[in-house]
């Protein structure tokens, strides 16, 4: 059964970090609608003054942050000793678990472009305090497949037609695909029936529901998010323009969320303890 669109969101401009201009597509106000996902930021920009101040050292606990770069680069470092550069097409999948302190400093490309997205995924209570881990996935490590109808799918996490993404062993069993559908094409993609599923358009335009008698549906464009209702497939149809979108799914956790800033726990007491430990210098549990 094709999933129908339950909600359409466009996001809002916000300032984060030391003064980074970005668009928050969903966040605190949308919990638990996107369970297990907490937040999606679109930080595409052509103006270096809007992002160069970056995200200086800050803590995370109880979540995973997934950064996907399209253009430009970002330097990163963390309390586990990881450091490096995320370049165009690369992914950083960081599991904060019991606690990590890190920084992310975008640099852009020679033309001043810095395009990317950061998604936050929640962790269940049983894994909130797991050991932190970091995965840096190069663009060359992300498989891409082209279907008979010309649809191109980059598989970051999950599986399509036997092709598995490099990110595995994630608690919420997520799928994360970068999908490009050419003009005048219909495409149906299977999704896990028990997962929360959304599509975020990052280029072009398309219809994300089959046409009904008397109307063709709502045409969605760049920087639009469609959250889908129950079902087991997502339908896409393009006309004179193709469409590119992120298709993300994950298994809901269904637990209470206590969230303040960069830390997400299950209770206010756990949240208070996390900030007490951060200020006392006992936040990091695993080196």
Image: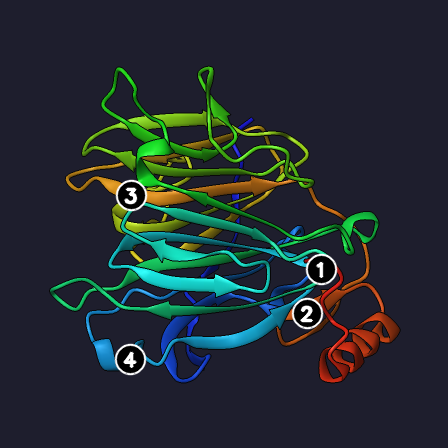
Please give the label number shown on residue 50: 4
Q: Secondary structure at mark 2?
A: strand
**Dots 1 and 4: beta carbons under 8 Å?**
no
Give the residue displayed 42% in from the left and 63% down from the top: 76
Give the residue number, with chain letter if any, for mark 1.
62
Calculate the distance from the C-alpha at mark 3 to the C-alpha at mark 4.
25 Å
Please give the label number shown on residue 214: none
**Dots 2 and 1: beta carbons under 8 Å?**
yes
First reached walking from the N terminus: tag 4 or tag 2: 4
Calculate the distance from the C-alpha at mark 3 to the C-alpha at mark 1.
31 Å
Q: Secondary structure at mark 3?
A: strand
Residue 245 percent across, percent down from the top left: 35, 45
Q: Camera-side residue: 23 or 158?
A: 158
Give the residue displayed 38% in from the left and 76% down from the top: 54
Q: Residues within 10 Å of mark 3 (few under 14, many from 20)?
A: many
Q: Residues within 10 Å of mark 1 (few under 14, many from 20)?
A: many
Please, is residue 18 above or below residue 33 in the view?
below
Give the residue displayed 84% in from the left and 70% down from the top: 270
Please give the label number shown on residue 244: 3
Q: Camera-side residue: 243 or 276?
A: 276
Give the residue displayed 53% in from the left and 63% down from the top: 78
Residue 162 percent across, percent down from the top left: 47, 15
Residue 53, quarter of picture: bottom left
First reached walking from the N terminus: tag 2 or tag 1: 1
Mark in the foreground, 3 or 4: 4
Give the residue number, with chain letter if any, for mark 2.
263
First reached walking from the N terminus: tag 3 or tag 4: 4
């Amino acid at each position: 059964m094709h999933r129908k669109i339950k909600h359409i969101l466009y996001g809002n401009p916000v300032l984060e970090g030391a003064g980074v201009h970005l668009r928050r597509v969903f966040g605190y106000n949308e919990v638990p609608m996107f369970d297990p996902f907490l937040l999606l930021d679109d930080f595409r920009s052509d103006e270096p003054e809007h992002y160069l101040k970056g995200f200086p050292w800050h803590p995370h606990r109880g979540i995973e942050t997934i950064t996907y770069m399209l253009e430009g680069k970002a330097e990163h470092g963390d309390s586990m000793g990881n450091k490096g550069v995320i370049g165009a097409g690369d992914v950083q999948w960081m599991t904060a678990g019991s606690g990590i302190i890190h920084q992310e400093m975008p640099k852009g490309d020679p033309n001043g472009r810095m395009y990317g997205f950061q998604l936050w995924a929640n962790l269940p209570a049983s894994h909130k305090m797991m050991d932190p881990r970091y995965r840096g996935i190069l663009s060359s490590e992300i498989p891409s497949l082209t279907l008979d109808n010309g649809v191109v799918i980059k598989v970051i996490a999950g599986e399509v037609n036997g092709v598995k993404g490099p990110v595995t062993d994630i608690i919420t069993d997520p799928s994360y695909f970068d999908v490009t559908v050419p003009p005048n094409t219909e495409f149906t993609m299977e999704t896990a029936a028990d997962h929360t599923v959304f599509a975020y358009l990052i280029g072009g335009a398309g219809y994300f529901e089959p046409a009904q008698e008397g109307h063709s549906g709502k045409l969605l464009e760049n920087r639009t998010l469609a959250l889908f209702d129950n079902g087991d497939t997502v339908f896409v149809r393009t006309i004179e323009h193709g469409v590119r979108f992120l298709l993300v799914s994950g298994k809901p956790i269904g637990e209470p969320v206590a969230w303040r800033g960069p830390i997400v726990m299950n209770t206010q007491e756990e949240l208070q303890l996390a900030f007490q430990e951060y200020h006392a210098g006992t936040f990091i549990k695993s080196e």
